[in-house]
Amino acid sequence: MEHGVSVLHVITKLAVGGAGMNTLISCRDLMNDGFPSEIAAGPERPPEGDYFDLARDWGIRVLEVPHLVRPISPVNDFIALCELTRIIRRGGYSIVHTHGSKARFLGRAAARLSGGSPAVVQTFHGWPFDTGMSLASQAFCTLVERIGFRLADASVVVTPEDIFKGTVWGVGKPHDYTLIRSGVELERFSGRRGLGGEARALLGIPGDCPLVGTVARLAPVKDPETFLSVAALLLKDFPDCRFLFIGDGPMRPAMEARVREMGIGDSVILAGNRDDVHLLLPGLDVFLLTSRSEGMPRAILEALAAGVPVVSTDVGGVCELLTGERNGFIRPVGDSKGLAGDVGRILSTPGLSEKLLGNVDSDLEPYSAAGMVEDLRELYRWCSGGPESGPPPV
């Protein structure tokens, strides 16, 4: 154990997605590097899938917090606070690292109540008040973040855009944040470039038809309705195009009904959860992201690594990678016509994909899993020395 540093990650639900995968990779690799790490998570097994089995396979201990649930519930939240405080006190962790709005608030408070004086790290994977919520909800979430912000010793964001948004909403100052980008095991995806035929064979899709796809939860924040709207627009000019949606979630019944209502069932594949995404991405001609809010979408990093150009809504840190017709195109949230136009431009312009991706490998270098883990290692070392050791790494 390096410097006697042990880490407890607190996350509301260990759901399939960027926050959960970042946490698992960090635990796995830092455990191998002398930082024993465990995860405290709520019991929810959401319809989009979870990482409990993967955590077990990687040898990561997950401590279930029975009352840690996503909806606001004063009774459950108080009990969850007590459960987390007990876990932290018994575990004697030197660092408590919190993820997600609910887990951030309760985890920070539990660490301070535990009596063990662990250092507290909080990661913002996007902001809760950046999701088109009502003004009252925005005001409440902002107040909660402002109150709890100073309970942490270090604050991590995954994109510079979230530093800007946090400071605009009065949550900390720019120098309060440390940037640690989402990390992807890029080689797992880049090693599949050029194997589009194999990918399409797995899906049963002909090799000569255009294929547009995405990887996302079927949830409102991912705006799958706009994905279907773009599909309907593109089918007017590309009638043989196929549209692949990998992922599951609470909106699946509504989306299945919407596909039938629109009469595009022969062209849209709702593939559900897949554990072979790295095998399927190379079969796409274009990756389409329609989210209404993100931090740094892990899905576009994986798609670009697989050699697929991206068309995306302008959310989170997407503009860091899609700028000046570099790697793809961005459009405002909900702009179905603009998104469809950009996808159609890629599909109909020979050589455009190769031109867009001309510098993709160098653009993706800051987003490697190894880089993320090294940045966390440096931050944890700073935490183990205490704030008196100087400002946190930036």
Image (cartoon, rainbow, N blue to C red):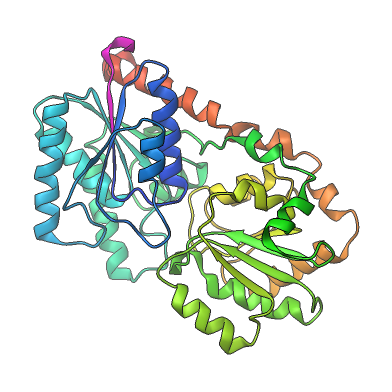
User: Residue placed at 38% from the left, 30% from the top?
Assistant: 27
The residue closer to the viewer here, 287 or 178, is 287
Indicate the quadrant where residue 177 lies: top left
Is residue 258 among the parts visible in the rendering? yes
Place residue 227 in its image quadrant: bottom right
Give left or right: position of 142 versus 168. left
Q: Is residue 81 above or below residue 260?
A: above
Quadrant of the frame with the N terminus: top left
- Residue 386 position, x and y percent, is 26, 18
- Is residue 115 left or right of 234 when viewed as pictured? left
Residue 64, compared with residue 70, is above or below; it is above
Residue shown at the point (57%, 89%) measured from the top left: 261
Q: Using residue 231 as the reference point, say whether residue 179 is left or right of it.
A: left
Examine the rendered structure and indicate whether residue 275 appears above or below residue 216: above
Does the stretch in magenta take in 5?
yes
Q: Is residue 354 above or below residue 117?
A: below
Specify whether residue 174 is in view. no
Residue 375 painted magenta: no
Q: Which residues are magenta?
A: 1-8
Quarter-of-image position of residue 342: bottom right
In the picture provided, is 18 more to the left or to the right than 384? right
